[in-house]
Image (cartoon, rainbow, N blue to C red):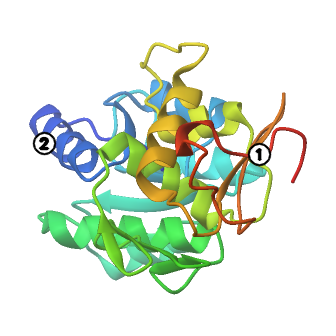
Amino acid sequence: MRVLLIEDYQPLRRSTALGLREAGFAVDDTGEGEEGCWYATSNPYDVIILDLMLPGMDGLTILKKLRDGGSQAHVLILTARDGVEDRIKGLNLGADDYMTKPFAFDELLARVRALTRRAYQAKNPIVKVADLEVDTASREVRRDGERVELTPREYALLEFLAVRAGQLVSRAEMWEHCYDFQAEAASNVIDVYIGYLRKKIEKPGLPRLIHTRRGQGYTLEPGDPVDAKTPASRSGRQTGA
């Protein structure tokens, strides 16, 4: 999932962005209000973490511009302003959550994960697709009861497919939600990681889960059992099934 962090205090921004990336999120970050507003209005984010006291443009102005423009991105205000009136104003302008500094990073992480679940109408942290279980809180994956070890990038792609199970997900959408803005795009990187996922989660005799829609993208949904003679990395329905 993709997060935007707008925080002007560089040590805090650096440590928070690092922690989020280590937790598997794609993170864009900036310390400038106007640049943060550009990021927020120009790119799709699952969650925006927004400080209020920013140079160039304050956080409440950014929030108002987002909501006036119709943005549905979930916004978590993270600020030193701890007054009740400040909380009320931020929430009334359209913030989804409000935290005050200093804060525990684990709590921030839990709140960000809760907001990403809300974005996809998923209250249960465990997403199930056939015998696949994706625990979005612990970031653990199990298939047929056995734990599957994934890299952070592999997990990010699988989680994004899982929360949209049964829907067609384009390569462009996967790139936008799973990679930092600064990441260098490669034409086949999504396909390469899908191949890695297939090798790890698709097993002979179990339903095939990742399906290719040629020229369109991928879906995650139960299909026919994987043939023991067919390598998982080459399986998948090329024309729709």
Return the residue nearer the eye: 166 or 99: 166
- Picture quarter with the C terminus: bottom right
Residue located at (39% from left, 61% from top): 77
State the CA–CA distance, disc 1 to disc 2: 31 Å
The answer to whether residue 67 is left or right of residue 117 is right
**10 Å neighbourhood of mark 2: few (<14), some, or many (≥20)?**
few
In percent of width and height, residue 55 lies at 34, 30
Please provide percent x and percent y for residue 42: 65, 29
Question: Closest to the observer: 30 or 175?
Answer: 175
Identify the element where label 2 is drawn.
Answer: helix
Instruction: Report the residue marked by disc 2.
Output: 15
Residue 149 placement: quadrant: bottom left
Residue 44 found in image quarter: top right
Q: Is residue 210 above or below residue 122?
A: above
Circle 2: residue type? Ser
CB contact under 8 Å: marks 1 and 2: no
Residue 110 in picture, x, y percent from top left: 30, 72
**Residue at horizontal 64%, vertical 35%?**
41
